Amino acid sequence: RIKDTFGKGTLTIVLMLFTLMVLIPFIWMVIMSFRTTADILNDPFGLPKTLDVENYGKLLFDSEIGFMRYFFNSIVVSVGALLVTLVLSTMGGYGFGRSRYQFKFRGPVFSLLLFSLMLPPQIFYIPQFTMMSKLGLLNTYWSLILIYAATALPVSTYLMSTYFSQLPSELEDASQIDGCTHFQTFWYVMLPLARPAIMTVTLMNFMSFWNELLLAITMVTDPKMRTIQAAMMMFVGENGSNYAIAAASLVLSMLPTLLLYLVMSDKFIEGLTAGAVKG
């Protein structure tokens, strides 16, 4: 009993230290957002004298900064890529996950899908840029939506196929006896049961799309079409930096992913652990 208590106590201390390591930069960033750049340069780790929300007011209402336009651009790109990913990954995952759907080259196609997970995404940047240029999609939402969705499809399809493979086949048999078509069985019976996996794919990919930077500055060079991550680079540069505005923009930019995680956290964990224990 003493050994177990010591082990649990040690684990608790380690987890608390790790939590502090994660939270301290976040708390420091929030504190910086209520200070001025001059105060930050004079005393980087100091506390704000007053809770001044002027930085947030400039971001939200200053037309020269145009923060809300960048915020809207990120919403359009992230939600658009997420919808494409969800539609294709759920249907593809259902086809690969259910053994009754046997089609030509099923195994090789799924193996190729898994192989693509091992490739670093950076090797695709030049071909993707060339492709988008020839299609005339540079400086448009579609360039990022299509590339984001294509990058997320392999792992999303794999997660969905793993979850669909755990569902009992009797549900499909019963629905088809009742007269449902294959698509109706998928849409009305199997898809609602896969809600935890869908939540996992949604949260995981939305965070990835929202925080992506390299493709955003490569495919989009028009200042009006910048995403929020690319726009935040303007606040910190070689010739001048506004650290207070940059900190406030970081706080606002993380709100969508934070709220989404708070809403979907339970289903997210359930979806990740699906198939871990198979009876």
Image: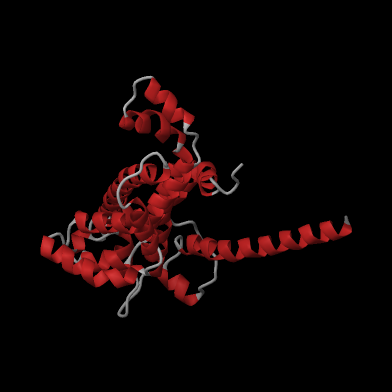
| Identity of the residue drawn at 32% across and 80% down | 238
Nearer to the camera, 24 or 18: 18
Nearer to the camera, 53 or 128: 128
Q: Is residue 226 above or below residue 188?
A: below
Quadrant that contains the N terminus: bottom right
| Identity of the residue drawn at 43% across and 57% down | 251
Quadrant that contains the C terminus: top right
Q: Is residue 137 above or below residue 276?
A: below
Residue 28 at x, y percent in the picture: 52, 65
Residue 146 at x, y percent in the picture: 24, 55
Q: Is residue 32 left or right of residue 136?
A: right
Residue 129 at x, y percent in the picture: 20, 68
Residue 130 at x, y percent in the picture: 17, 69
| Identity of the residue drawn at 38% across and 65% down | 246
* The quarter of the displayed image where residue 278 is located: top right
* The quarter of the displayed image where residue 122 is located: bottom left
Question: Is residue 209 at all visible to an observer of this figure?
Answer: no
| Identity of the residue drawn at 45% across and 75% down | 41
Nearer to the camera, 206 or 157: 157
